[in-house]
Amino acid sequence: MTIQWKEEIELIKSVVNKTELQHSIKWGIDVYTYEGQNIIGIAPFKAYIGIWFYNGVFMSDPLNVFVNAQEGKTKALRQWRFSSMEEINPDKIYSYLLEVIANEKAGKRLVPDRFVKFEIPEILEEAFKNNTQLKAGFYNLSPGKQKEYALYIQEPKREETKISRLEKIKPMILEGKGLNDKYK
């Protein structure tokens, strides 16, 4: 545990322990569950400590404290950040915890979008014409991994960035690895 946030984490955990949530450690952080479902996580960072509400998208957020870490990408997760002990109000945290537990009991859970068809970027199509092994490697990947690569190449606005990304992923495709496999 980061020594810098030790007291703040203990205070937040003392509030969570007043609820029916069960404590566990997942991904190296404190995670609290209800009937096996992840409800919240508590994690320290350099500049703040955060409470992650795994299905925070369904919460009313009356204090307007939630942050969506990656707008447009993060669907359900919301984070409440504290940068000092003075910002931590146990009563307010407790009320948020009661709401997130009630939402879980009511079955409010974000269902992931169905697989959406995607376009193969032109730059990737061109690379396939010049390298049949790359093309074969790409189409041997799962549709999800193909989509990750296609979107990764498609995202940047600058052509130079698209080219550098293509060069970066070629060996990974040839090895049969997905873009995000190193995080698994």
Image (cartoon, rainbow, N blue to C red):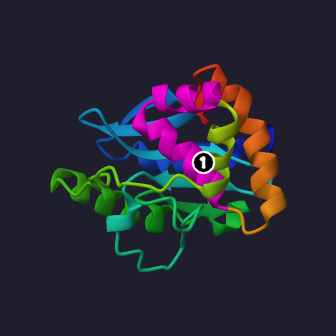
Amino acid carrying label 1: it is Glu
Q: Does residue 135 appear to the left or right of 131 in the view shown?
A: left
Q: Is residue 87 left or right of residue 93?
A: right
Q: Nearer the viewer, residue 56 or 8?
A: 56
**134 falls in the magenta region:** yes
Report the span colored magenta.
132-155
Quadrant (top left, top right, bottom left, bottom right) of the N terminus: top right
Identify the residue shown where x is 31% and y is 55%.
Answer: 113
Is 117 situated left or right of 122 in this image?
left
Does the magenta segment cover residue 73?
Answer: no
- Say which element carries label 1: helix
Q: Residues within 10 Å of mark 1 (few under 14, many from 20)?
A: few
Q: Residue at x 56, y 68 (%)?
A: 71
From this viewpoint, which residue is outermost toward the front?
129
Residue 161 at x, y = what percent? Answer: 80, 57
Q: Predominant secondary structure in magenta? A: helix
Please, is residue 154 above or below residue 32 in the view?
below
Residue depicted at 43% across the width and 60% down the height: 75
User: Looking at the rendering, which quadrant does residue 80 occupy?
Assistant: bottom right
